[in-house]
Image (tube, helix red, strand yellow):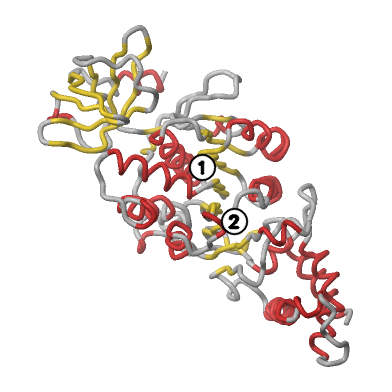
Amino acid sequence: MQNLIAAVERIDPLTVFGRVAGVNGLLIEARGGLTRLSVGARVEIERYGQSALPAEVVGFRETRALLMPFGPVEGVAPGAEIKIRPEGAVVRPTAAWLGRIVDAFGEPIDGLGPLPQGEAAYPLKAAPPSAHARGRVGERLDLGVRSMNVFTTTCRGQRLGIFAGSGVGKSVLLSMLARQATCDAVVVGLIGERGREVREFIEETLGEEGLRRAIVVVATSDEPALKRRQAAYMTLALAEFLRDQDMEVLCLMDSVTRFAMAQREIGLAAGEPPTTKGYTPTVFTELPKLLERAGPGPIRPDGTTAGPITALFTVLVDGDDHNEPIADATRGILDGHIVMERAIAERGRFPAINVLKSISRTMPGCQFQEERDVVKGARQVMAAYSNMEELIRIGAYRAGSDPQIDRAITLNPAIEEFLSQDKDEATSLDDSFHQLSSILNAA
């Protein structure tokens, strides 16, 4: 009954309409109702023989509003009626959404029936908590993946980027984190994914155990740019809701690059000038607004702190170039980066993480002294082997020339075995350090 009363109170007694003035590519120009429109406002456009087409205001040109639709423009005619929605882009989730799969509008797409609606409205494009009104990162988080537990130890509320090219195992790594990480709830955003891979990821890679405590947001690559961008906002809005329920939330998004590509399409259609590699200025404006929403929770008036959102965002590097614009901008915003390399994947070691190029900005503060010594020793061994790897492979290095390199050659098979991990295998944080310490002490 309370939900019904709240729904009735949200009804606006005044309905404002506009008209379609023209269609130009991805943009629809509208006239009328400008006093009730603003950038980001939602409208519904009538179509012949089809359901109303939702759209968003992305700009203005003289006396006309520029709309971008959430679907195909087929059926839109000049003079078609446009209904302006009074409520902005919001979602009303509940804890019953856990275990469900939704689209960019928060509508279920898993065939399990409708979702209950909560009382509180969470805006999709919420502002991040202010810097002085949010907590600090908490204790370290057990991710269940040995290489990340040891070499990129992560704190609760930290944000990490996973930088990789296509086909090197990003999705499998995300599924390992979703199933094994120590947290209360997981929100997975699949932004611009291939349509055939969505069910494979959910049913096989994520699995029933991972889905049970997760909400999955899906927007495939064939959907309009506006819908792909909104799926990213929806992912963070759902994570913020779970955070406000004092849950420790793990937010996984694949990928930030496709969010940036969607924003580029929207910006170019609205008339923005292209800059680096065709990306528009709003891409680099929206990236920090999106990524900063994750992290430690805001401090409440009573002095308590809401639950943290620990986030891992994948970045699909263009042409395996880790210095391309989106990767470079994202790396500067996040609290660390994990680099996955194709060469490591090609030799059959998964997850294909290059630990020498990966870093967590909360280290070494979140490790004990003996753990820092273990990590330092392991890095020295791996760096020594990496520097001489080519000579070792062609047989040009003579054993006995350098004791440090001899030790690195001896330990390399065991360290490679340590870094390799099956997707169904989980190793606790303490066990990870113990195993690596045993390897180093063996020689």
Q: Quadrant of the N terminus?
A: top left
Circle 1 — which element? helix
**Alpha-carbon span between mark 2 and mark 1:** 29 Å
Residue type at tag 2: Ala
Q: Residues within 10 Å of mark 2 (few under 14, many from 20)?
A: many
Res 434 quadrant in image: bottom right
Q: Considering only vertical position in the picture, is 139 above or below 297?
A: below
Residue 222: percent from left, percent from top: 49, 31
Q: Does any portion of residue 9 appear in the rendered image?
A: no
Mark closer to the chain start, 2 or 1 = 2
Q: Residues within 10 Å of mark 1 (few under 14, many from 20)?
A: many
Q: Which residue is mark 1?
A: 242
At horizontal 39% and vertical 53% (from top left) the residue drawn is: 287
Residue 399: percent from left, percent from top: 88, 87
At horizontal 29% and vertical 24% (from top left) the residue drawn is: 10
Residue 248: percent from left, percent from top: 57, 50
Depth order, front residue of 86/161: 161
Side (left or right) of 242 relative to 200: left
Circle 2 — which element? strand
Q: Residue furthest top?
A: 49
Q: Residue 267: give its label.
A: none
2 vs 1, front mark: 2
Q: Which residue is mark 2?
A: 164
Residue 30: percent from left, percent from top: 19, 25
Side (left or right) of 117 relative to 73: right
